Amino acid sequence: MRRKWSPVSKLLLVLAAASGAGAFLVVSMYARKLEALRPAVGEPVPVVIAARDITRGTQLSLAMLTVEEIPSDFAPPGSFGATDDVEGRTLLAGLATGEPVTETRLAFAGAGPIAALVPPGLRAFVVTSDVPNSVIRSGDTVDVLATFGGGRPYTDTVAEGVEVLSVLSPQTATTSLGGPAPSAGGTRLVLVVSPELAERLAHAAAFGDLAVTIAPPDSTS
């Protein structure tokens, strides 16, 4: 015997059909809007982005990077389409996860990790310090003092308010810079200085004993 649909069942069936048709209409309209917007934002293009937070001075490796497709109009100027294009380059500024890698954030291709960070017109000068390497960080500001011996020993401030570009542990300093490691617990500080100040520091290091004092953040003295 053929089953009869109750009025309630018929109403529910009509409502379900209407809901499905409405949903299909909404999705279709949304798809058409997206398609209409495509010429305005451009076709998707591959852009290299940071797969994790990366600090300034880091040499980029493939593990740090990924590629995402974004509309061409949203791709920043100087961006890259393949991770091979930036592998081995040094970051001049830090990147947060998801930020695009651009040419302005990178040092010249082939530049070493220290040379890549030295601003034009300045020099990187290495000072040996007995301060433990965990105490000073890149970006800190220090003063350099020299103590000269002889009949009347005295101490003179050779450099004030210079930026620490990089901090090298004894093991890192030995392998990357050559020469004997600093004394136990010490480290080598790579400072950003002018060529004239580099000469004064070299003279002080040759005839005296250098010491470093750490200035507070945003110190102007």
Image (cartoon, rainbow, N blue to C red):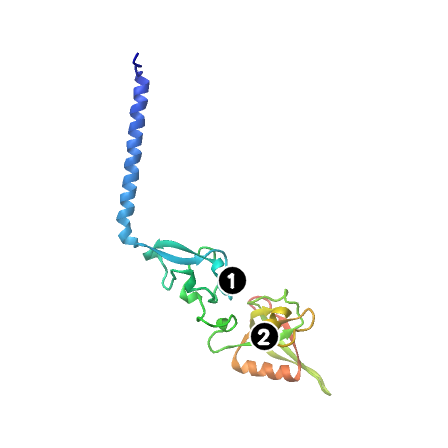
Q: Find disc 1 in the rendering and name its residue.
A: 55
Q: Find disc 2 in the rendering and name its residue.
A: 177
Q: Dot 2: within a 10 Å radius of its alpha carbon, few (fewer than 14), some, or many (20 or more) residues?
A: few
Name the amino acid, label 1: Thr
Question: Is 126 located above or below residue 84 in the figure?
Answer: below
Q: Residue 219 carries which label?
A: none
**Total labels drawn:** 2
Q: Answer with the quarter of the image where residue 168 lies.
A: bottom right
- The percent position of residue 179, horizontal first and vertical second, equals 63, 77
Q: Which of 16 and 129 is in front in this view?
A: 16
Question: Is 20 located above or below residue 28 in the figure?
Answer: above
Q: Which of 6 and 89 is in front in this view?
A: 89
- Answer left or right for 77 relative to 131: left
- The percent position of residue 38, horizontal first and vertical second, equals 28, 51
Q: Answer with the quarter of the image where residue 4 lies.
A: top left
Residue 99 seen from this side: no
Name the amino acid, label 2: Leu
Residue lying at the far front in this picture: please name it: 1
- Answer left or right for 99 relative to 28: right
Residue lying at the far top in this picture: please name it: 1
Q: Nearer the viewer, residue 43 or 212?
A: 43
